[in-house]
Amino acid sequence: MKEIHPQKQMLDLCLRLHQSNHAYYSGISEIDDFTYDKTKKELIELESKFPAQIQEDSPLIQVHAEPQSSFSSRVHRNPMLSLANVYSVDELREWETGLKKLLKNETPKYVCELKIDGLAISILYEKGILQAGVTRGDGIQGDEITPNLKTIAGLPLKLKKPLDLEVRGEVYLSKKHLLELNQRRLQAQEPEFKNPRNAAAGTLRMLDSNEVRRRKLDLFVYILTEGPVKERHSENLELMRDLLLPVNPETQSCNNIEEVIEFCNQWENHKDAFPYEIDGVVVKVDEIQLQKKLGFTAKSPRWATAVKFSAEQAVSILRSIEIGVGRSGVLTPVALVDPVELNGTLVSRATLHNYDQVGRLNLHLGDSITLEKGGEIIPKIVTRELSSQTSWQICPPQNCPVCDFPVFQAPGEIDWRCNNFDCPAQLNERLLHFVSRRAMDIDTVGPALIEQLTLKHKLCNPADLYKLQISDLEELERMGAKSAENVLKAIKESKNCSLVQFIHALGIPHVGEKTASVLARMHGSLQDLMECTPETLEGIDEIGPIIAESVVVFFDNQKNVKWISDLLEIGVQPRNPETSSNSGIPFFEGKVFVITGTLSEARDVWKDRLESVGAKVTGSVSSKTDYLLAGENAGAKLSKARTLGVQVMTEKQASEELS
Ligand code: IVH
């Protein structure tokens, strides 16, 4: 019998295993489990006999991995962003309308993909050889978990062509393997994983890749970020498939939004049939050129969205109602329910928005209700399942739960309000908003300090902050001389705020930071803004009738005018936007930037560019920093920004905002 050279035999076995792995992930079962296991066994035997001949892309390579002591972190070459969500057909159509507006009526084609419930990963190949796998981390840098990634059978260690690539995908555990893992954990008296996402995350973080291999992670790649990128995303998927990378076979190109909707509806009805958990559909613009035109927001690409038509629901019992009092007195009922699991978290509170909603749902204490988690952080009650048969109907209170003042509902308004401008709850909310980071940014004044000072009647309005003496602070609990000094210093520094910050800090209903920036730009000074009429406001593109009315009503209230003039009198001097900032961009205006790392252009170029659109560039990261512009090899400044919660921006994102 002719003897086959072991090296050749090993090469052949590797190829067969790679091909069948690939076929498996493409939805075609090429060989049966028995043949697959036999082939794998043969390779294991040969590799242990001839370790020097092991192929660098052997699908068994993970067997030889040594446990790691820790993971090193690695900065992503392009940020790993998240996706925005839509929750209905209407929202999906609105998303497309927005795209068309930005594309000046060019209509894109789309690709629909399943949204696999797992963990995002970036995978790097050099000359076709797998180099590294990096978790998403904070989107800017993640953990390099290469040995763990190599345990995934469907991921080729060597591509069909010697290309340099960065691909992204989702690592997940199939329903079957999650069940097996949870059974083992139960036996070992360890807590079960609630969902595949937690299981995949927990597994990828394990230091012993032999245990990782036992858990049988899987992967689908869904984007080609770097490499020989084609003109269409669908062609990139095809290219990745040709290179033997695992691309989900359920992916579909759609010519228009109607076809996208059809795909989403179809998937809804079949999601239980898949061997892995799906939490929606991802819709992507197919043309790369159009993707580039659309660009990114700070958090997600504009050219893609996740579609989640049916939000997760759970049934619970409504036990009581807590009433929140906002800074303009609006009463918000919050339902307290028996704790129930929703999307892998235990939920015991649900928003009811307002009493109109309570009436519409005809809610009674003790009712069995359905909760749903949509786009909001706090879930909402969507239906009443069963009446409790009690007579405890939920009605608006007659008096404010905090100050006992009678509540009222203005004609034409849905909200019930506490009408006491000096209500402690309103004052507390007003002060918290005033000092917050995006407003006056007085970071040494937090909720505990505000509570103590209001109780002692030292703070009756925001202007009182500037009247505080060191003795007022030193007599408070846990306040040393040094801390007291720091508090006063930060309050004093805030006197030199920008007009945008100041307008935002006033807490005018419906006026967020963006609107504050528009108002500052259009009016130029606080005095001008305070004298405006609904007509002048509505003349501004970005301002609609609701905001206009709200601004005018706010400045008509003499109590508001009083604390604003107190602030000005005491030396708060909002900086009017400079005249040159006509060319400014609202996003950058007044924002404090720090630049770090290696950028594609000199730092001075970036500095000039940012300053010319209204930003301020400083040298070191502090709580005053709004954004860190980080290039490659960003070091200490990046770590500090992360510790302080300062937003990190890449060159690409900054360019998108500038364009
Ligand atoms: S594209 C730039 N495609 O969903 C954003 N993401 O909620 C690229 N995910 O972080 C993401 N399946 O972990 C994309 N087919 C798919 C996906 C997918 C699952 C995950 C991914 C992402 C998260 C956003």
Image: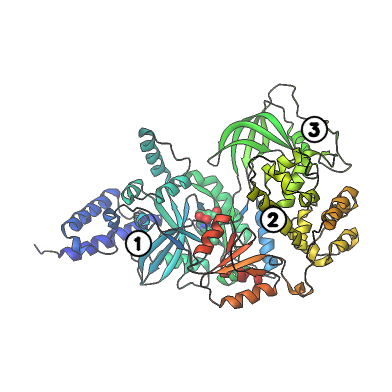
Q: Position of residue 564 (x, y in %)?
A: 84, 54
Gap between marks 3 and 1 measured at Cα: 62 Å
Question: Given this view, does label 3 or label 1 mark the residue nearer the observer?
Answer: 3
| Residue that label 1 marks | 156
| Residue that label 2 marks | 490
> For residue 534, which quarter of the picture?
bottom right
Question: Given this view, does label 2 or label 3 mark the residue nearer the observer?
Answer: 2
Q: On screen, 346 above or below 63?
A: above
Q: Position of residue 587 (x, y in %)?
A: 69, 65
Residues at discs 2 and 3 in contact (Cβ within 8 Å): no
The answer as to whether callout 2 falls within 8 Å of ligand 1 is: no
Q: Is residue 139 left or right of residue 385?
A: left
Mark 2 crowd level (few <14, some 14–19, many ≥20, 10 Å Cα): some
**Mark 2 or 3 closer to N-term?**
3
Q: What residue is at 52 percent from the left and 70 percent from the top?
A: 597
Q: What residue is at 35 percent from the left and 34 percent from the top?
A: 188
Question: What amino acid is at disc 1?
Answer: Pro
Q: Is residue 356 left or right of residue 11?
A: right
Residues at discs 1 and 2 in contact (Cβ within 8 Å): no
Q: Nearer the viewer, residue 110 or 482?
A: 482
Q: Nearer the viewer, residue 315 or 571?
A: 571
